[in-house]
Image (spheres, grey):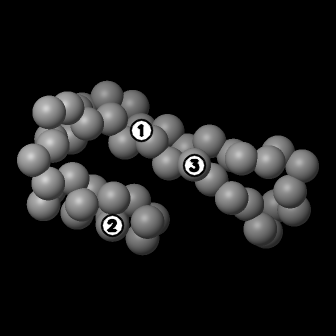
Amino acid sequence: MEVWQQLLSWVQESPYQWREAHELEELRDPDVAEHDPVLDLYLPVEW
């Protein structure tokens, strides 16, 4: 959750705007241990 907050703060301080659509968390390696996942985070923005 902290990373999402950082990403949202970045958008708020940038010339971009958050586009109200679905955010996405995508697991990079589905075979990784459950306690050690690595996720790609996608936050839709618009200029």
Q: Is residue 45 left or right of residue 35?
A: left
Q: Which quadrant would residue 47 be assigned to in this image?
A: top left
Task: Tell me where residue 44 appears, x and y as whole percent.
Answer: 33, 35
Q: Which of the image's four quarters has the N terminus?
A: bottom left
Mark 3: secondary structure:
strand
Q: Amino acid at mark 1?
A: Glu
Number of numbered discs present? 3
Dot 2, crowdedness within 10 Å: few (<14), some or many (≥20)?
A: few
Q: Amino acid at mark 2?
A: Gln
Q: Earlier in the sequence, mark 2 or mark 1?
A: 2
Frontmost residue, 47 versus 12: 47
- Kindly identify which numbered label has been placed on residue 6: 2
Residue under the point 69% across and 46% down:
27
Mark 1: secondary structure:
loop
- Kindly identify which numbered label has been placed on residue 45: none
- Separation of disc 2 and disc 1 at Cα? 14 Å
Task: Tell me where residue 30 appears, x and y as whole percent.
Answer: 82, 45
